[in-house]
Image: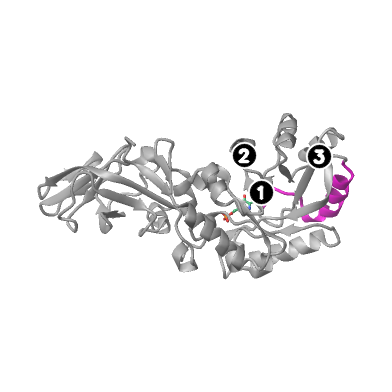
Amino acid sequence: MNRAARAIIDSSALTANLLAARKCSGGARVMAVIKANAYGHGIVATAAALRDADAFGVARMEEAAAIRDARIEGRIVLLEGVFHSEQVPTAAAMGVELVVHSPEQIEILEQCGRDHRFRVWLKIDTGMNRLGFPPESAQEVARRLLGCPSVLGPLHLMTHLAKADEMADQMTGRQIECFDAAIDGIGGERSIANSAGLLGWPASHRDWVRPGIMLYGISPFADSSGSDLGLRPAMTLSSELIAVHSVAAGSTVGYGGAWTAPADTRVGVAAIGYGDGYTRHLGNGTPVLVNGRPASVVGRISMDLVTIDLQDSPDARVGDEVVLWGRGLPVERLAIAAGTIPYELVCGVTQRVAMTVV
Ligand SMILES: *Cc1c(COP(=O)(O)O)cnc(C)c1O
């Protein structure tokens, strides 16, 4: 190990969060969503820790291939289906299940005749206006799909919620009603809920829930953190101090001289920066933990380095641990400071950060 910046992935937290999702879902089956390299946590290690899920949800063929290459069996749902007909043979060979959200994808299935067989998840657009068939076409699309020799019946039926993290909003209720009306009479298992639906909207649970963010111990709601919901953070991003020095009162630190020392100050330099995914949208005042004690960032975040005010850690020295988020410091808090959502922070951890699975 020659890199200081690392992400520790706690596989027992992943497993515990899956159990929490199951407990909350009232007996629904759980599709563990592990797209985007399992939200930055490493798809293979995450899939292994979440082996007990009833299926995995991924966005890309490469993600399905990574799971199969690691010899992890189990159902895989391609959440956006295939993008091109050339992907069909590989998808079939991997035994993945396809979301079908567009007329083009129906044509692809019609063209493959009896060569391949797929379980299909028919996606209805109930208001997100992103992917899916209009509700009024659901019955006709279902008939057309069931007429394809390549489609194994019965269909699975799904939709996606746009505002389930906003508990006071009417939209989720309207989306659920719209979904029910659209698919009335079509046989097959139903799925509506993402993490926010699972945690906040029991009426959305149905046959399958599709949690993503909560499995990583992160809250989908802006006003809570995972631990408030009984979840455990799965990723801790950390590095170490590679220099400690004093800065005289009135001197500035870092690019642009964005921070001026109000008094003589000990400043630590940790080996992590935006090149690791510790975004430059954080900055002055961002909380960090130095040897488990609260401290804060001073000045701008550089590509490889971040500078930290050590006034509350007088004993800190080179080699000491700095936690940027995770254990003891919810990534939800950092997301607010960065003006983004925790999803983007964990997904943004870059390749050069060493991943350690414990
Ligand atoms: C990403 C995704 C999810 C998971 O959403 P979270 O908010 O992370 O729980 C569920 N369903 C679909 C279709 C998705 O794309």
Q: CA distance from mark 2 to mark 3?
A: 21 Å
Name the front one of labels 3 and 1. Answer: 3
Q: Secondary structure beneath disc 1?
A: loop
Q: Amino acid at mark 2?
A: Arg
- Viewer can see residue 181: yes
Q: Looking at the image, can residue 341 be seen?
A: no
Name the secondary structure under disc 3: loop
Residue marked by disc 2: 71
Q: Where residue 252 appears, x then y in whole percent?
A: 17, 45
- Residue 134 covered by magenta stretch: yes
**From which residue to which does the magenta span run?**
129-148
Magenta stretch encompasses residue 238: no
Which three-letter amino acid code belongs to the residue tagged 3? Arg
Give residue 193's position: percent from left, percent from top: 65, 60
On the image, the x and y values in percent for residue 119 come to 78, 46
- Residue 117: mark in rendering: 3
Q: Residue at x 53, y 47 (%)?
A: 46
Which three-letter amino acid code belongs to the residue tagged 1? Arg
> Which residue occupies 57% across, 47% down?
47
Which residue is painted at 77% across and 47% down in the image?
A: 120
Residue positioned 66% across, 48% down in the render: 130
Magenta: main secondary structure equals helix
Residue 130 tag number: 1
